[in-house]
């Protein structure tokens, strides 16, 4: 058992603290926000993440997990201190390390005995040495090591990702630190999870390179979808066949309205800046950012070409979070798509299973379900693939619509089925014209096996 302190009870900190306590370590999660601590003290979680509340509760009951506002006591009693505070982009899009610096200074003040200081937040290369120099400057005599241990968990499936990761990356400044970190992750060693032992700088780069590559895959398949639209091909079939090549893999090849969330937009931008600062222009990544911006606007163009004009049209938007199983709307495509629809004259009726307000987006009528949203609508625009939208009753949905059109931004419905239901339907790189009856069975058999995932894997784009 290792004594761990996690500083920052945001998304990464809380998931990390809960999971590491479940591994058998003794964990204290520290925060300087008394309101947050009060919420956690009542057994509530300040955001929506499946399974997290139960995991926190169970480990608190077993006295392995606690919350505290006392950074001094929590740091001095810890063998390992994780820094899991936010690194929001500053005005130029660089990751702002203000909170990391503040926490490093506080750790320097209170660490007692050999201490390992771990960066868990996504931080630019060089942050490990920055933390090291802050600690060394303030406590030249102290016995410590710095480690970078980036997280690869996805919102909505964070617990599963943490407990059964593809790999764990540990970038350490000494063998001694590496040995302690191995103890922290002991249950994963037993599961034979690949553990990558490397340097701090490599670990920091691995995180950015991984997220940027996933974003690149998405922008790439979105562009293939746009070409499919133009030449009359079906991107879902193209992506499936591409993915059967082991070198490509089928994961993160789902065309859609562009990626969003708190990670890909921020990390791709930050990596272009890291490269720029080092004197290198990262051209593919610049294109990824541009394609993603254009893809969001393309959904508006699609709605416009379906309806002729958006002036005085009513659009029923289904799903506004950046993906299912989360209440997070940070950088969600909905934040740019909805205002643009409104700007072009459309009225929005919207539904989302967990969200009923969007920051900066007014004049939206929030509805009780998909059918309520579709009342009087000229078009249904499915933006987030929540499970409850995967098996809609089209008879019921169409009955109250002014015009039966459906813009399926996540390609969850088959164009031929939609035609049978009497809907004019458009997907992303997938249309009725691009599908053929003799090719349907094969596609359907394969689709039915993975297009309706179990609830806990609803956002699992790995399968
Ligand atoms: C992402 C990474 O997947 C995690 O590995 C990483 O740890 C995390 O960022 C982070 O850096 O903290 P997350 O942002 O939670 O996780 O969500 P994803 O499931 O990766 O989805 C991101 C966006 O890409 C969503 O808007 C999603 O709809 C979109 N997406 C994903 C697609 O449009 N197509 C796909 O095939 C996959």
Image (spheres, helix red, strand yellow):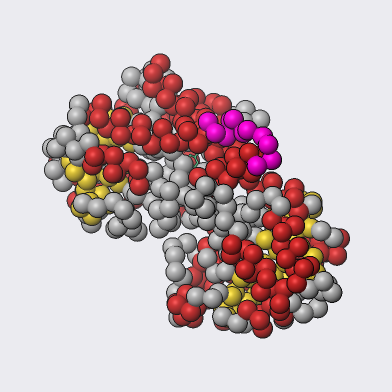
What residue is drawn where x is 27% and y is 32%?
303
Q: Is residue 18 above or below residue 196?
A: below
Residue 252: x %, y % from top left:
53, 38
In-front residue for pair 5/86: 86
- The percent coordinates of residue 231 (x first, y second) are 40, 16
Relative to 413, is 309 on the left or the right?
left
The reply to whether the magenta stretch includes residue 102 is no
Determine the residue positioned at 58% across, 45% down. Answer: 270
* Residue at 39% across, 43% down: 333
Location of residue 23 (image quadrant): bottom right
The location of residue 387, given as percent across then percent down, is 38, 49
- Relative to 343, 114 lies left or right: right
Residue 319 x, y percent position in the rendering: 33, 48
Give the quarter of the figure containing the C terminus: top right
Quadrant of the snapshot with the N terminus: bottom right
Counting the numbered discs, the total is: 0
Is 284 included in the stretch rendered in magenta?
yes
Does the image show residue 410? yes
Q: Residue furthest top?
A: 231
Which residue: 63% across, 54% down?
Answer: 123
Residue 226, by quadrant, is top left
* Magenta stretch in the rendered image: 277-287
Q: Is residue 60 above or below residue 445?
A: below
Closer to the camera in the image, 273 or 408: 273
């Amino acid at each position: 058992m290792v004594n761990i302190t996690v500083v920052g009870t945001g998304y990464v900190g809380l998931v990390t603290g809960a999971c590491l306590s479940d591994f058998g370590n003794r964990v204290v999660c520290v925060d300087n926000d008394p309101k947050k601590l009060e919420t956690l003290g009542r057994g509530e979680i300040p955001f929506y993440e499946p399974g997290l509340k139960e995991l926190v509760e169970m480990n608190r009951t077993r006295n392995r997990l606690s919350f505290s506002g006392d950074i001094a006591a929590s740091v001095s009693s810890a063998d390992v201190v994780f820094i899991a505070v936010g690194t929001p982009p500053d005005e130029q899009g660089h990751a702002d390390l203000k909170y990391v610096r503040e926490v490093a200074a506080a750790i320097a003040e209170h660490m007692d005995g050999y201490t390992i200081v771990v960066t868990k937040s996504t931080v630019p290369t060089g942050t490990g040495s920055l933390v090291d120099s802050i600690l060394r400057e303030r406590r030249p005599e102290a016995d410590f090591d710095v480690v970078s241990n980036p997280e690869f968990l996805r919102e909505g499936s964070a617990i599963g990702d943490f407990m059964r990761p593809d790999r764990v990356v540990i970038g350490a400044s000494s063998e001694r630190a590496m040995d302690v970190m191995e103890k922290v992750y002991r249950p994963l060693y037993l599961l034979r999870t690949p553990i990558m032992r490397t340097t701090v700088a490599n670990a920091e780069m691995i995180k950015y390179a991984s997220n940027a590559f996933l974003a690149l895959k998405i922008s790439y398949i979105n562009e293939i979808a746009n070409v499919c639209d133009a030449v009359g091909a079906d991107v879902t079939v193209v992506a499936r066949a591409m993915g059967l090549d082991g070198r490509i893999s089928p994961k993160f090849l789902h065309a859609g309205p562009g990626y969003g969330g708190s990670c890909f937009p921020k990390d791709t931008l930050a990596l272009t800046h890291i490269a720029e600062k080092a004197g290198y222009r990262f051209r593919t990544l610049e294109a990824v950012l541009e394609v993603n911006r254009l893809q969001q606007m393309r959904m508006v163009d699609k709605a416009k070409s379906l309806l002729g004009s958006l002036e005085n049209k009513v659009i029923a938007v289904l799903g506004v979070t950046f993906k299912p199983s989360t209440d997070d709307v940070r950088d969600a495509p909905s934040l740019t798509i909805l205002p643009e629809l409104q700007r072009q004259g459309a009225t929005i009726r919207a539904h989302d299973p967990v969200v009923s307000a969007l920051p900066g987006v007014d004049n939206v009528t929030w509805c009780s379900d998909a059918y309520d949203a579709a009342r009087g609508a000229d078009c249904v625009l499915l933006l987030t693939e929540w499970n409850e939208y995967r098996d809609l009753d089209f008879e019921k949905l169409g009955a109250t619509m002014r015009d039966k059109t459906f813009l399926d931004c996540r390609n969850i419905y088959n164009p031929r089925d939609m035609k049978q239901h009497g809907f004019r339907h458009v997907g992303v790189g997938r249309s009725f014209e691009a599908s053929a009856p003799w090719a349907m069975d094969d596609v359907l058999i394969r689709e039915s096996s993975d297009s309706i995932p179990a609830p806990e894997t609803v956002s699992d784009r790995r399968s």
